[in-house]
Image: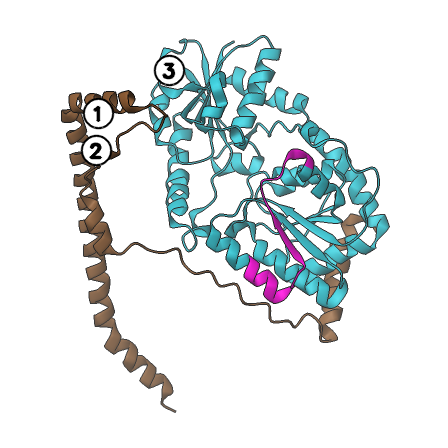
Amino acid sequence: MIVHQVLSGAGPVDAVTVQALRIQELLRGWGWRGDIFAGHIDPRMGRRVRPLREIEDAEPDATLLLHYSAYAPRLRDVLEMAQRKVLLSHNVTPARWFWDYEPTIAIHCALGRRQLPEYAAACDVVAGVSAYNAAELGSDVVIPILFDPAHLGAPAAQDPGGSELLFVGRLAPHKRQDELIRTVALLRRHRLPGATLRLVGEPLNPNYLAALRELAEALAPGAVTFESGLSDAELADRYRRAAVFVCLSEHEGFCIPVLEAMHLGTPVVTRPVGGIPEVAGDAALLVDDRDLAVVAEAVALVVEDSELRGELRRRGSARPAAFAPEATAAALRAALEGA
Amino acid sequence: MEPERAIEVARERAAAARERGAYADDLRGFAISRPTRISTQRLMEWAVIEPDERLLRSTRRLGAPITWFKRLLLRGLQQQFNELTSQQSRFNMHVLVHLTELEERVRTLEDDVAPLLREHEQRQRRP
């Protein structure tokens, strides 16, 4: 069987590109073949990705797997090709989170979300990387992320203790790092005077980073650390030394950092939004309260109660198995063969 | 403690702490200056695009022949290049017309509504 994958853009650190490369490896393991095509290609990708225009020569019996994660007008021509098509939605963040902070991104998000159903209608099979993403398009076909934590190394040998909170994700309005800063401020004032917060991620723009820094200095001086551009080893180190991974995002299509934290033995407290409940299962504390006092108390419980922390670590360590390559491979194969 | 119990316990503890007067902190203060908006006047200046052909050059060391070749190519493709720039300029101009019309309509509406708002505020102030 021939399966070509289509992306709007490809780069070495782009999560969707990484997924496409892993899927390609999987397909080759089955004896299938196929290339990856993209509209924009980072020169560092070398020959691993082919220019989108070359897909015109695709074999008539090939299946096209379209990865959708952002506004992609260049993929429109692909929809008109006669080959069977599978759309895999990685989710597009709603524009409302960006209008006040980065309107050009908001425009892309608005266009992307408007375009997605149109693309879905033109494909033979529509799937999402989570049930949440699939349901947005009226589908129940789920092809989860191929989660491979090998690059992060082994879990922490022992509980690091301490009271450091960690969140990994782009510094952006819908990720609500501002709420995390407020939470650590409450913890320091009322429950854990030594609590600190580490925020790892690229900022949306310099203005947004400056505003978060200002809030951190006003509410919890010296307690919040901002980091970005970490290597895999450095990132794994941050997970291992954190007492708890806290996610107060308002929108997540999947949230790989939750799985990474679980793999490395960090207990997780998170809001149950978007695809997070299916990713976290019963291995995290799901706090849907808007009251940050409840969030702070939940975090304090995890930090102080070794039995609770141990149980979350135990359940968390088993959770990545639900996203093992075998499970995703079966779902992927069923979707591709059913197209 | 089992994770299934933890959130309930956290809620109880937060409620009890609030009764003692805790968690009454003022945590506001997250103000982000809007990204700089380009003025309509400036957009008008940008609408008709005129790419500077002198910027068409090679940045490589000893790139003079490449620069010469690129400019030669551009001259050969001048008709297509002009078509591209005129299409883009046409689009930009029409978007700007829409934008300025909308701004004008909003301004007119705000002017029309202003006396009504003042009257409403005065009524609310009356005992």
Measuring 84% from the left and 41% from the top, which residue is drawn there?
Answer: A158
Q: In this image, A42 relative to B10: left or right?
A: left
Chain in cyan colour: A
Amino acid type indicated by mark 3: Glu
Q: Which residue is mark 1?
A: B71
Q: Is residue B117 placed above or below A219 in the rendered structure?
A: below
1 and 3 marks on the same chain: no
Res A278 visible: no
> Is residue A126 highlighted in magenta?
no
Q: Chain of mark 2?
A: B
Mark 1 residue element: helix
Measuring 48% from the left and 15% from the top, which residue is drawn there?
Answer: A35
Residue B68, image quadrant: top left
Q: Which residue is mark 3?
A: A54
Q: Furthest residue to the front?
A: B62
**Mark 1 in CB contact with mark 2 (< 8 angstroms):** yes
Q: Furthest residue to the left?
A: B79
Instruction: Tell me the colour chain B is drawn in.
Output: brown
Q: Which residue is mark 2?
A: B53
Where residue B18 appears, as percent x and y from the top left, is 71, 71
Mark 2 residue element: helix
Q: Say which of A176 and B79 sits in front.
A: B79
Residue A185, image quadrant: bottom right
Amino acid type indicated by mark 1: Arg
**Of the two numbered discs 1 and 3 in the rendering, the one whose residue sits closer to the viewer:** 1
Mark 3 residue element: helix
Q: In this image, B103 relative to A339: left or right?
A: left
Q: Which residues are magenta?
A: A213-233
Q: Chain of mark 3?
A: A
Q: Say which of A219 and A32 sits in front.
A: A219
Q: Say which of A337 and A215 sits in front.
A: A215
